[in-house]
Image (cartoon, rainbow, N blue to C red):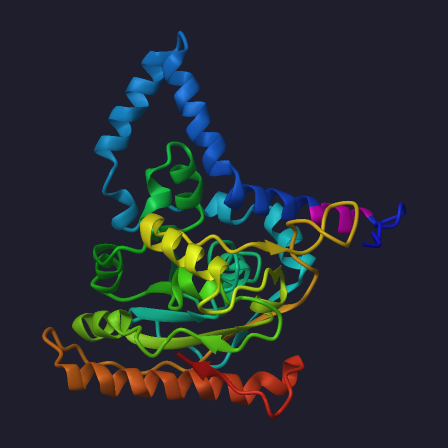
Amino acid sequence: MKVEFAPLRVPLRRRLQTAALVQWVFSFLALAQVCLAAFVLLCLSDWWILAALYAGWLYLDRDTPSCGGRRSRWVRSWRMWTYFRDYFPITLIKTVDLDSRHNYLFGFHPHGVLVAGGFGNFCTEASGFSQMFPGLTPYLLMLPFWFRVPFFREYIMSGGLVSSEKASASYLLSRPGGGQAAVIAVGGAPESLDARPGALTLQLLQRKGFIKLALKHGAWLVPVFSFGENELFDQMQNPAGSALRRMQDRLQRMMGVALPLFHARGVFQYSFGLLPYRKPIHTVVGRPIAVAQNPCPSKDDIDALHTLYMEALMQVFEENKKNYGIPEDKHLTFI
């Protein structure tokens, strides 16, 4: 394989963008393991009393990821996130104004490999969410597993990440006065196993839990489609029924975390590595669907709203796809 090396003379700004990307990829792929190892070493050191005190704090603070987390505007506003945004770049597009008197449930599609658009738009202020949607506070839902990792949990909560447990979303959507926006990658971990350039298949047909949640709390639904999310990484071929896919599905059921075998580019060369390609991400926030509160929705109620949501998501995609290089004959497929 011919290796394409990065040029020696690269503008400082592009180097800073790559450095921000390295930090972000490291935080999702290795920082949790580093934090866990640091905690274990602390337990075995002469400073074990600090580990014991922190363990006590973990117990007392165990419900925080399910009760809105502990966001930090300072962390969300780090200069580093502007370089992270500009690496791709990431752009947030508003379709209509959102009334901050309501609570919202944003359905984010597609999941992609690492949800780069979701993180950049909703866990940082780099794309200007607070200015674009004044009065709304976004929370990106993440698998509960990650909030059990010492130290790492503090870092991810500071950006506005919260547990994806039902109780966590319910806490946000039931807040009086409105202004809360819970963001959920509806396709979840299984959808990441199909994230590759050109993929337009979404796991949505059987995903109705978020619909029931919106009905129970009267939260308005907002379809969000992130154009370019699947273009960032290549992935090993793993069609349904293949040995690799069966192993990935089994691990996902056991661990709750998908393990896509992805690759893209490196730091000093463009031929292989774990950094995403420099491909633009355009995250379009669609029109809200008004939802009347129904504490005990029937199956028909859920199915009717689910159908309406799929139609709204399809509309967001069809109205915007020509702006982002998707051919007219390409359409979303729901499975």
Q: Relative to residue 318, is residue 186 depicted above or below?
A: above
Measuring 21% from the left and 81% from the top, which residue is drawn there?
A: 302
* Residue located at (37% from left, 80% from top): 288
- Segment colored magenta: 12-18
Q: Residue at x 48, y 77 (%)?
A: 201
Up-down relation of residue 104 to residue 325 (above or below): above
**Secondary structure that dominates the magenta span:** helix
- Is residue 287 or residue 267 the one in the foreground? 267
The residue lying furthest to the bottom in this view is 329
In the rendered structure, the answer to whether residue 87 lies left or right of residue 106 reads: right
> Residue 253 appears in which quarter of the rendering?
bottom left
Residue 309 shown left or right of residue 193 in the figure? left
Residue 71 part of the magenta segment: no
Residue sitting farthest toward the top: 46
Given residues 117 and 102, the one toward you in this image is 117
Specify the quadrant that holds the C terminus: bottom left
**Can I make out residue 98 in this image?**
no
Q: Is residue 14 one of those drawn in magenta?
A: yes
Residue 211 in the image, given as x and y percentages of width and height: 26, 75
Q: Quadrant of residue 104?
A: bottom left
Q: Is residue 287 above or below residue 143?
A: below
User: Which quadrant is the N terminus positioned in?
Assistant: bottom right
Across and down, in percent, residue 301 comes to 18, 84
The residue drawn where x is 70% and y is 61% is 278
Residue 87 appears anywhere in the view? yes
Horizontal and vertical percent for residue 266? Answer: 72, 48
Q: Is residue 211 above or below residue 321?
A: above
